[in-house]
Amino acid sequence: MLNKPENNKWKRWFMKPFLADRFSHQPDLLFLLSIGLLLFFGLLFLSSASSSLAFGQREQDVYFFVKQQITHGLIPGLFLFYLALRIDYHRYQAYARWFFYACIFLLLIVFIPGLGLAGATAKSWIDIGPFSLQTSEFVKLFFILFLAVYLEEKKDELTDFKLGVWPFLFYLGLISFLIMLQPDLGTLSIIISTSLAMYFVSGARWKHLLSLMAAGVLGLIIAIKAAPYRLARLTVFLNPDFDPQGISYQIRQALIAIGSGGILGLGFGSARQQTSFLPEPAGDSIFAVIAQESGFIFSALFICLFAFFLYRAFKIVKSAPDNFAKLIALGIVIWFSVQIFLNIGSIISILPLTGVPLPFISLGGSNLAITLLAVGILANISKYTLTNHYHR
């Protein structure tokens, strides 16, 4: 009996984010349910997609990469999610400039000799002891938080080209330049799309927005011409039969995997393409493995699960209690929408390959941890929405 008050204290501390008080209500339970389902299916399909690679490279431990995803991504991600759910989103307003400084630091640190790791086409990882971090994943969220504060503070000046457009262009241009040095065109596409959407919602003029979009298209053209592999990817998108054993190999194998799955799929763990042919079966190409194993019907339902997750997230944006919350929520939702579309769209060959992971699903601890942090912030905002939309 003497320990009961102390136990209740810890219980209240742990459950506080999920309980209503006079200033808030419960977080969006359907939104939380969609996150839970995506995490479940992510680990389930990762266990199949990574089994062959783990068996051949990690002392015949077929669950090596699943364990790594749990220890490096899921566990720290759930901790970050819980912290984000507890912290009132208004607190981020006091740290705007530090979020921007963090973006610059994270994008520069990958170029330090001995610390940064060079990937196949992008230098965007750092090695810290037994851990590797993709710093650009953190930049996506930190830049959204910085822009939300900046755009809220400067909302009365955004229609002025000198006071509104030029400062916004400077911040976005600096981040874009550093990302292009890596280079990482997929991340750059996400950050530019997210930034322009937030800028537009903040009250920008159409002519200013169109000017920025034109500048972005011009920069994209220059970036494609500057790197031969980007031009090759565009060529493959326009002509899938170009260089079938070279640059178009990945997309051809992905399409073979998707097509061979048929209506009902080959069965869990029966994907043939990921065993010997499909590059990055647990990473960028994991949707092809899902389609081959589960077939068209489940793949369509799986996409519907993503759509439901985004629908609930958009409802949080719509019912946000203030403009600052709306900007944060919109930025995160656009980020996920673009990234999901880029990943699945490139694998089914309606977009050029960009190399971005599928949120909640692809192998990558940094990606999963920062994804859970971002949805934790969304869930926190959902506690303060103007209507209890999760009852609808």
Image (cartoon, rainbow, N blue to C red):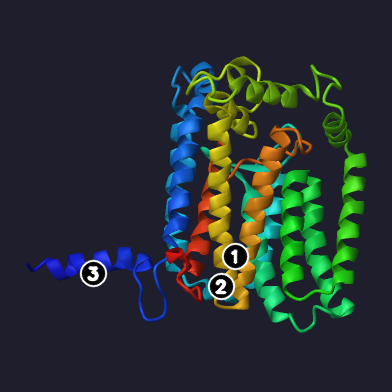
Give the amino acid at mark 1: Ala
Q: Nearer the viewer, residue 221 or 347?
A: 347
Secondary structure found at label 2:
loop
Q: Nearer the viewer, residue 197 or 392?
A: 392
Q: Which residue is mark 1?
A: 329
In front: label 3 or label 1: 1
Q: Which mark is residue 94?
A: none
Q: Which residue is mark 3?
A: 9
Residue located 56% across and 30% down the image: 290
Left of 61 or right of it: where is 292?
A: right
Left of 234 or right of it: where is 113?
A: left
The residues tagged by marks 3 and 1 sit, at their Cα atoms, a distance apart of 31 Å
Give the amino acid at mark 2: Ala
**Number of marks present in the image shown:** 3
Quadrant for residue 7, please give it: bottom left
Q: Which residue is mark 2?
A: 320
Q: Is residue 139 visible?
A: no
Q: In x, y percent, where is residue 27?
A: 43, 65
Q: Nearer the viewer, residue 194 or 1?
A: 194
